[in-house]
Image (spheres, rainbow, N blue to C red):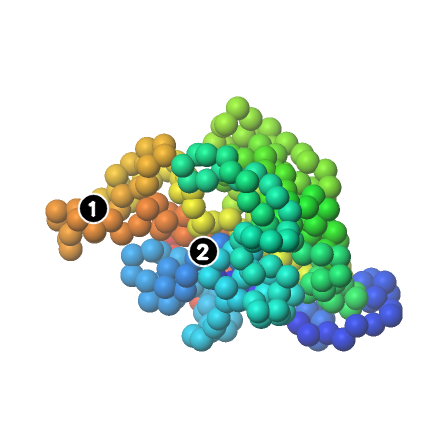
Amino acid sequence: MAAGALLAQPATAQSQEAQGQKATPERPNIIFILADDMGYGDLACYGNDYIQTPNIDRLAQTGTRFTQAYAGSGISSPSRCSLMTGRNSGNTRIRDNFCYAGGIEGLKINTRGDTIIVRRANLLPQDTTIATVIGTAGYRTCLVNKWHLDGYDPGASPNHRGFDEFYGWTIATVHSNSPYYYPYYRFHGDSLITIRENEHDAHVRHNTEISTDDAIAFIHRNKEHPFFLFLGYDAPHEPYTIDDTSWYDAQGEWKCVTVKKGAPLELYRISEDPCEQHNLADEYPQLVEQFDEVMRKMHKPSANYPVPDDEVKKK
């Protein structure tokens, strides 16, 4: 799921001069938001009747809602590669999360907890990204959080593939996103910084919150000239790590079995499933709703916020 718009702008030799200009209706600031593994059917504005997404619904209400769209692939890296390069998956550098030939070997922990050796392809310096193109038009560019196009090449991070700024994690440096959703390490450009609040495996600052703060800080720093921000959230991708499930517990019609570490959340609609046979989501809805809540924070600077009937109370 993505919310945003892309601007086609011809390259110009006066990019430095253009970067000093303010955004205009003809040269708007661009924020592209990607929610990892979220399907259109997960949102209330597309007909979902048990996951509440009022803030994303506002974006749909004040913008354009697409009813026909396609992703470059059904999995992460090739889909992102298509999006980032504008090529279909038959012509992209990366065509799967892993490869049997080419690429670079590296270590991966599989679902059983075993460490295995796999190969991954990565974007090369000669690959043109949207950041490369839009940067020549005078835009300041930034990628926040998930890139997933570096394979096992430490030199293939976003700030080495066209983006001026990068705040997030890479595949090549495994501990830059560990533990998942509550990371202790995080890249700021080429520097690996620490999130002190998450020290000793503490669940204090969620990755979604960290990424939102990084994105808003970039917006404020660059509000005086055109910018392109690619905000790639991890949510609601697994692993399903949410500590607070109290919202479900209080609903009456719903029953939420409190999460135990390493086990999926169970969510049942008691009125339709009194025997609790159909688990509606493995903690996935709560991640969607958490993502929706940060959209309120991202949307607030907009001239469209608040919109009419903005009376939806926080849970």
Which is nearer the N-term, disc 2 or disc 1? 2
Figure check: 79 above or below 69? above
On the image, the x and y values in percent for residue 126 come to 75, 61
The kind of residue tagged 1 is Gly
| Badge nearest the viewer, 2 or 1 | 2
The answer to whether residue 232 shows anywhere in this view is: no
155 or 252: nearer the eye?
155
Looking at the picture, which amino acid does disc 2 mark? Asp
Residue 84 picture location, percent across and down: 63, 63
Task: Please tell me which residue is depicted at 87% across the width and 70% down the height of the picture.
Answer: 13
Mark 1, secondary structure of its residue: loop
Q: Is residue 75 left or right of residue 231?
A: left
Quadrant location of residue 111? top left
Residue 162 in sight from this viewpoint: yes
User: Which one is nearer the viewer's eye here, 229 or 168?
Assistant: 168
Provide the residue designation for mark 1: 252
Outermost residue, front side: 101
**What residue is rendered at 63% in x and 39% in y?**
173
Which of the numbered marks, if any, corresponds to residue 296? none
Whether residue 108 is situated above or below residue 226 in the rendered picture? above
- Height in image: 76 above or below 138? above
Task: Point out the residue furthest to the left here.
Answer: 275
Residue 208 location, x and y as percent?
52, 45
Under circle 2, the secondary element is loop
Give the total number of marks visible in the rendering: 2
Q: Residue at the spot x=56%, y=53% of the render?
A: 99
In the image, which disc is placed on residue 37?
2
Q: How far is the residue under mark 2 from the one under mark 1?
A: 29 Å
Which residue is more in the foreground, 254 or 147?
147
On the image, which quarter does residue 163 sit in?
bottom right
